[in-house]
Image (cartoon, grey):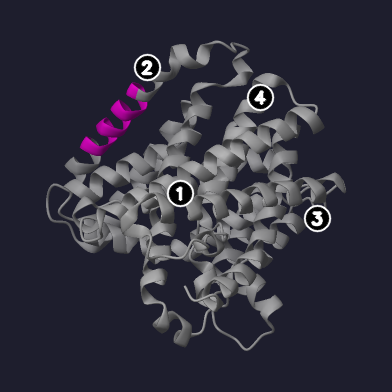
Amino acid sequence: MKLTFALLIIIFLAFSGYHLTFRHFRLPLFARIFYLTGTEFLVLGLLLGPQFLNLVDPETQKGLAPLTALLLGWIGLLFGFQFEIKKLRRFPLEFFFGAVLEGLITLALVFAGVYLTLVICCDIPNAFMIVVAITLAAASGCTAQTGLAFLSPDRIAKRQNTVKFLRFISSVDGLIPLLIFGLCFFYNPSTGLEGSWLGGLWPGILTSLGASFGLLLLFTLFISHRRFQRELILVVIGMTMLTSGLASSLKFSPLLTNFFVGFWLVNLSRDKERIYQILMTVEKPTYLLLLVFLGVCVRFDSMGLVLLALVYCLYRALGKFLAGFLVTRVNPELQKYPGQLGFGLLAQGGLSLAILLDFQQAFPSRISTFVISFAILAVIYNEFLSHYFLERLFKEGA
């Protein structure tokens, strides 16, 4: 009974919030940053969780795991649909390499900083420390476009080339971080086999790709004939549930598995536009549900969380600044863009949050809850820093 009630409350919050959030009301800047990014739903999730109302206790969270997997799978499909090769070819090739390089540099720098900090400051088993560092680095490598929403139309019109490049990076730079995050599922410390990572890496990659290809074939069979819209909606929801459920039962990532399926679909299916419209219809409620589930996982029970969040936020900011500078200086074709390009890459967005939730679902423990808690605080810090540094980027003649 409690599980059903919690499910109804969470869905009600998400779909009612869909009609109120993301709208441009006249609010102070501080309130708009919270409101337009849906941050208030993190607070709602925290209130529903064990630390306050306890409506969604650990047992209820286990019961809601299938819905969580479906959310992650939906986000993975959406992200996979951004990599349609035909559309990517419309952009200069240096855009793609620049975005990938930026994500990779940020990931590498943040991984090094986070790992060293965990070794010095936290009592985490060494076998799990690598997984935590990879997760936080992967989440830091992703960028969102939310900061651009706070810019005036005049500024965007004057700096259209820079805005176009920033938007492209924010759509693509999560590719390498997401793939690197998949390594965590080949190195599960719960097995106690610390040396099994490299031995199981290639078999694991081949298995995941093979499973994605098999699910893609099944998906293709369902949509091989022209179907009515309602039938296609059922197919998309059913296949996403099947893919996410299968990945979860195999202790793999629903996010990454559905990313592969989405990538193959967008490049091979003739119904890709109709499927994409179905996915986009519930994009915002999915994002709000994601925030609620993350809020439920958070525990703010230590002042050390605030300090660790600041350190993690600093690592990510430095990584983005340096990555933006190197990307615009290494490639001659990108030297026309400002060296401070990283100032416009601080907002994190939905993919980084999905990575954090996927980590929490795959490795549930006290340590995971601790990591998620300070990572969420860092995401909120980044939203405020993003606006400040984006203003500086455009004031300095980008």
Residue that numbered label 3 is attached to: 53
**Which residue matches tag 4?**
128
Q: Earlier in the sequence, mark 1 or mark 2?
A: 1
The tag on residue 378 is: none
Closest to the observer, 5 or 215 = 215
Q: CA distance from mark 4 to mark 3?
A: 31 Å
Q: Identify residue type, mark 3.
A: Leu
Q: Is residue 183 above or below residue 310?
A: above
What residue did someone put label 1 on?
Answer: 102
Q: Nearer the viewer, mark 3 or mark 2?
A: 2
Answer yes or no: do the residues labelled 3 and 2 have beta carbons within 8 Å?
Answer: no
> Who is closer to the viewer here, 378 or 360?
378
Q: Secondary structure at mark 3?
A: loop
The main secondary structure of the magenta stretch is helix
- Callout 4 touching callout 3 (CB < 8 Å): no
Q: Give coordinates of residue 393: x percent, y percent.
A: 54, 71
Q: CA distance from mark 1 to mark 3?
A: 42 Å
**Which quadrant of the view contains residue 291?**
bottom right
Q: Position of residue 48 (x, y in %)?
A: 74, 56
Percent x, y of residue 232? 25, 56
Residue 234 in view: no
Q: Which residue is mark 2?
A: 203
Verify whether residue 210 appears in magenta.
yes
**Real-space Cα distance between discs 4 and 2?**
21 Å
**Which is nearer the N-term, disc 4 or disc 1?**
1
What residue do we see at 49% from left, 61% from top?
A: 339
Name the foreground residue: 163 vs 74.
163
Secondary element at image label 1: helix
Q: Residues within 10 Å of mark 1 (few under 14, many from 20)?
A: many
- Identify residue type, mark 2: Pro
Q: Which of the 4 image quarters holds residue 264? A: top left
